[in-house]
Amino acid sequence: METNMLATSFALQWGPGICGFMVAMALFGCTLGQFMFYLLSFPKDLKSLKLSVVLLLVVDALHTYCVTALYWKYLGLCHGVTSPPCPTVLPWEMLASVLLSYFMSCMVKSFYAHRVFIISERNYLLAGLITATTATEFVLGMLCVNVAFIDQSATALYSTPWSARSAVVSACCDILITGSVFFYLRAGRRETRRRYNYFRQLMLVFVNMGLFTCVIAIGWCLLYVLQNGNDYIAFPTTFICKSYANSMLAVLNARKSMRERDRELCMVGLSTISG
């Protein structure tokens, strides 16, 4: 009976995180593929943008290393062992992975804030609001890390109210970004048909990726409320940052397919005229 209870406790403690880890690995593979596609497709992009993409990949790789090392240390080398060199306190990899996760999230949202600033024709209020919510999310994330560092407990990281608050702010920021893009690139803008199709396709990519990250953040909030802040929260928090990395790269890479479609339409039009 006691053995079954221990097995159940172990599964509840590590199961959600392991499931999230598998999703994170799949998303990291997508990030690598999208990164290679970006480098091959857009060699003439601004250096600042290319450096941002490279930095995003480096941070994502560091996050992947920290999460992998964490689970290997706990579930591989030190399962059931409490003597040195196995950790009796919270490993640095966990704190580092959380820090990197919030940094990636804020980095991608800063990119989106700049894009919204451009398409809104320099709407300082809107861009400032997105930037403010992004900064607030990062501060709340640092408070989560501080709580976990003081208590030296992963449970404290998931059970602290700062975790749920950061998820709420993250979801609000995603909604704000997605709504802004939808508003400014919506149907009815006075553009030529060709530019209208381009804006419409770009809007669809923006909105779909924004909804994806927003749903993850909302799921994070719901798990906190319904499960009283237990280890189930490890599932979405393990891979949410990687969804942001894929979101940014998907938006950047979508430009190529749109331009290729435009070229095909032009070729069809020219062949029709020639015929």
Image (cartoon, rainbow, N blue to C red):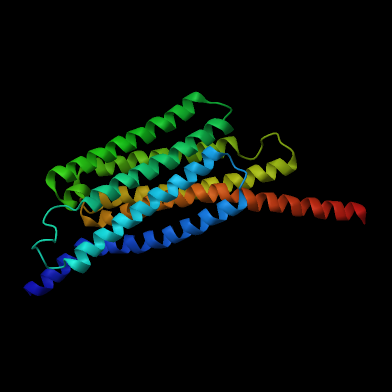
Q: Which residue is at the front of the view, 257 or 203?
A: 257
**Number of marks in the image?**
0
Q: Is residue 80 left or right of residue 115?
A: left
Q: Is residue 136 above or below residue 103?
A: above
| Quadrant into which the C terminus falls | bottom right
The residue shown at (30%, 60%) is 68
Q: Position of residue 72 (x, y in %)?
A: 25, 64
| Quadrant into which the N terminus falls | bottom left
Quadrant hosting residue 137? top left
Q: Which residue is at the front of the view, 115 or 92?
A: 92
Viewer can see residue 271: yes
Q: Is residue 20 left or right of residue 188?
A: left
The residue shown at (31%, 64%) is 19
The residue shown at (19%, 61%) is 13
Task: Tell which residue pokes out farthest to the right in this image.
Answer: 275
Viewer can see residue 225: no
Q: Position of residue 53 (x, y in %)?
A: 49, 46
Q: Which residue is at the front of the view, 235 or 61?
A: 61
The residue shown at (27%, 48%) is 96
